[in-house]
Amino acid sequence: MARLFPNNISQRPEGTLLIEESHEGNNEIYYVPHHDMLALSKKSAKSPGLHKTLLLNVNITQNYLEILPITTLGSSPGFLNQKYSKLKSIVLESFDFEFPNNSEEITYLLEELPSGFVKDPDYGLGLLKELKPLITTLEEFGVEILIIKNMKLEKSEIDASAKTCIMSYAQFETIRKELAKVVSNAQKASLSIRKTVANNTLSFFLDHKDYPQKTLKIQNTALARLVGKGIEEIESDLSKPDQSLTLSLIEKNAKKIANDQPAKLLKLRDDIELVTLEQLIEKYEKMLDKRHSEGHWQSLFNENPFILSMAFSCPIIKVQGQASVGGRKISGSGDKITDFLVKNAITNNTAIIEIKTPQELLTGKEYRDSVYAPSVALSGSITQILDQKYKLQKSIATIKEASRIYDVETYSVHCVLIIGTMPDDLEKQKSIDIFRRNSRDVEVITFDELLEKLKLLHRLLSTNEV
């Protein structure tokens, strides 16, 4: 049987390259397939030149080389068509390639292409198989033209309207090397598995104690792969089993880690606290953007009581949420319920916290020029919390006895009202500050001020000086 490719079965038959000057300073390079490939594709092989396909644009004036990857395998349905589904061309800018005038110079030019590029025109040019994930990603982003510039760029950019991605050569090299590492690690893992399989299969047939079977030491989990790589600065989406394993390992070895590596354990604790705080801030911000009821905010503060401590200058402990502070009538109605009852962690002196909503207005109509009266919601809420204070102080003995909570005192009950958000108008801000700074018994704090306190805490915890 005659061989289709007589020289070397692993090599494709060589096509030819044609140069045409489209305009001054720009040469178009066409690929003409070998007649064997034309025959394989069932195209007429009598005049191969009729099937020439544009492969390269070399522009010496603007210093760029454009590659138009094509499919060159005759048996492929896409023979001589665009190689990739969406990516049409790859442009190399400012690489100072020599301007080719004949086929030998074209060959030299292709040999000078950067690492990661197909350099044989009989394989359609483009990127090596190892970089297929990059092509797939670009196409998922809608990119049709990849421009790689041989210059320093702060970041890569995608122009969605032009369907173009621009990156520096250094950025491209980083991506290429990272993908090469993945391929190398996969090959090493595959070799280890194949060696173990070969050993164990042969050991089975030998059936002798001098040739024991080996245990495969590769674990197919994200955690095991990360540990195997030994990379510290890496992020990974651990599965729930991996998360459980990680937590279990730390929990079981906490004392030993504390003795051997106390600094790292403290850093881990701090990192966890920071992440938890970041998530809380993000949730708080999302809630501020929506019109949630008092109940939603009460639930948030109940789940994260330390937020409430941001409103105090002393350490506090939550005593009770939705606490009765007295006022019950003989008919059974009239109980005064405060949102949160807290106490000083040292002196046991109590404080009352009343929660409203961020959408409550803080100012009413303009009373005089640039002077605003407090809103009905603000003045009414202050009266409400003062009434709760009065009832608590009056009924504290009965409340202690009924609840069997004796370590609370009411000799100077502090009141905190969380309500509204600070308006943008400077005159309204001034009126609010004047009003609340002259409120002796009630501390008024807005929801956005509480958020800023959380952000400030995050910034403080994030610095190395703390």
Image (cartoon, grey):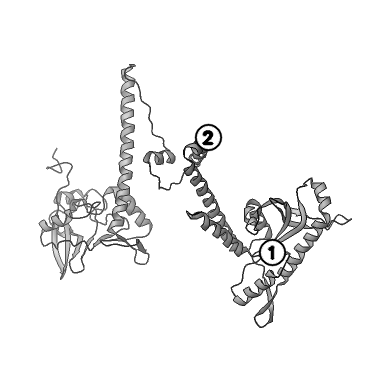
Residue farthest along the top direction in this orientation: 208
Label 2's element?
helix
| Quadrant, the N terminus | top left
Q: Nearer the viewer, residue 219 or 35?
A: 219
Q: Tell me the quarter of the picture where residue 301 sits.
A: bottom right
Residue 443 marker: 1
Question: What residue would you read off at disc 2?
Answer: 252
Amino acid identity at mark 2: Lys
Q: Nearer the viewer, mark 1 or mark 2?
A: 1
Disc nearer the start of the sequence (1/2): 2
Q: Tell me the quarter of the picture where residue 362 sits.
A: bottom right
Residue 318 position (above or below residue 447): above
Q: Nearer the viewer, residue 106 or 151?
A: 151
The answer for how far apart the CA atoms under marks 1 and 2 are is 45 Å
Q: Are there few (<14), some (14-19), or many (20+) residues within 10 Å of tag 1?
A: some
Please name the residue shown 33% across and 53% down the image. 134
Residue 59 in the image, given as x and y percentages of width and height:
19, 66
Label 1's element?
strand
Residue 118 position (above or below residue 225): below
- Residue contact at pointers 1 and 2, CB within 8 angstroms: no
Q: Can residue 335 be spotted in the picture?
A: no
Horizontal side, residue 81 vs residue 357: left or right: left
Residue farthest along the right direction in this orientation: 330
